[in-house]
Image (spheres, helix red, strand yellow):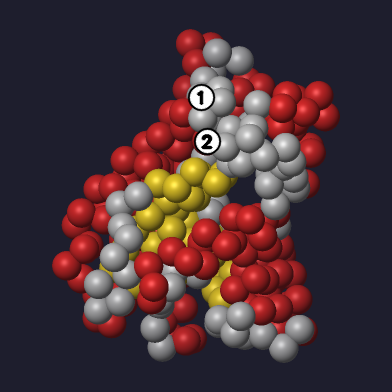
Amino acid sequence: MVTGAGRGLGRDYARMFAAEGVAVAVVDVDDEAASATAAGIVGGGGRAVALGADVADESSTLAMAKRVEDEFGRIDILVNNAGIWGDYQRGPLLDVAIDYWDTVMAVNVRGVLLCSRAVVPAMRRQRWGRIVNISSMGAYMVAGVYGVSKLAVNQLTYALASELGDDGITVNAVAPGSIDNEATRRQVPPQGMETLIAKSMIKRPGTSADLFAMIRYLTSDEAGWVTGQTFLANGGFNTRF
């Protein structure tokens, strides 16, 4: 199950899982976008179901999990990818509209908790599960509401891992750096990306494939002894910042 999979990195993760033979639940608040991603996977010979769901709404996430279990018989993997970012353009925290704060925190933090809670019963019955939360290197920078929410995701990851370790369920986070995709190109000017790359050890932006390599490992049997961790995948940016 990949949330926010109607477009961008979430869509890429869903496609990459499907290419490895994984049955994918494509979750997005945009029904049409979710359907388009799922249709592309099915058209390519994979298995996928589209689910329109609001990750910040408890009843929606519970219905989402039920449908996935009904469709596939089990829930093995949850990638909490849905999120809102780019709020640094809204100005300093002291000036940000509180409604916007609430929206970002609802999707980026509450959504991770609700989706995780929704899938845990199925994972507990199986005695096996993998939850990967998408954080950000913004958690370690001055990045407005977004940065605050992603640091909260890191702590939520650790807390959930501590509660689920005895159930055969691991919970980890991946914190991407500067990624070359449509969302970044829409919100970060070219000179801004150049500055970020210049501060990195590896002088190129990351790709969805770079991130999926980490996600795939964390959702594998081999990663059964890895939990409660946040992994920076950012070309070495934070070590030079």
Q: Which mark is residue 122?
A: none
User: Which residue, given by chain and number where applicable, does mark 1 sit on?
Assistant: 141
Q: In the image, is residue 86 above or below residue 45?
A: above
Q: Which residue lies at the image location 59% right of the left edge and 55% below the top edge?
A: 211
Residue found at the very far front of the displayed protein: 201
- Circle 2: element type: helix
Badge 2 amino acid: Met
How crowded pointer 1 is (Cα within 10 Å; few <14, some 14-19, many 20+) is rated as few
Q: Is residue 19 above or below residue 205?
A: below
Location of mark 2 (residue): 137
Q: Is residue 200 left or right of residue 75?
A: right
Looking at the picture, does residue 216 appear above or below residue 157?
Answer: below
Q: Residue 69, percent across and down? A: 41, 81
- Residues at marks 2 and 1 touching, judged by CB atoms closer than 8 Å: yes
Q: State how far apart marks 2 and 1 are (Cα).
A: 7 Å
Q: Is residue 125 visible?
A: yes
Specify the amino acid type for callout 1: Met
In the displayed structure image, the side of residue 150 where residue 237 appears, left or right: right
x and y, in percent, of residue 241 in the image: 56, 23
Callout 2 environment at 10 Å: few (<14), some (14 to 19), or many (20+)?
many
Q: Which quadrant holds residue 8?
A: bottom right
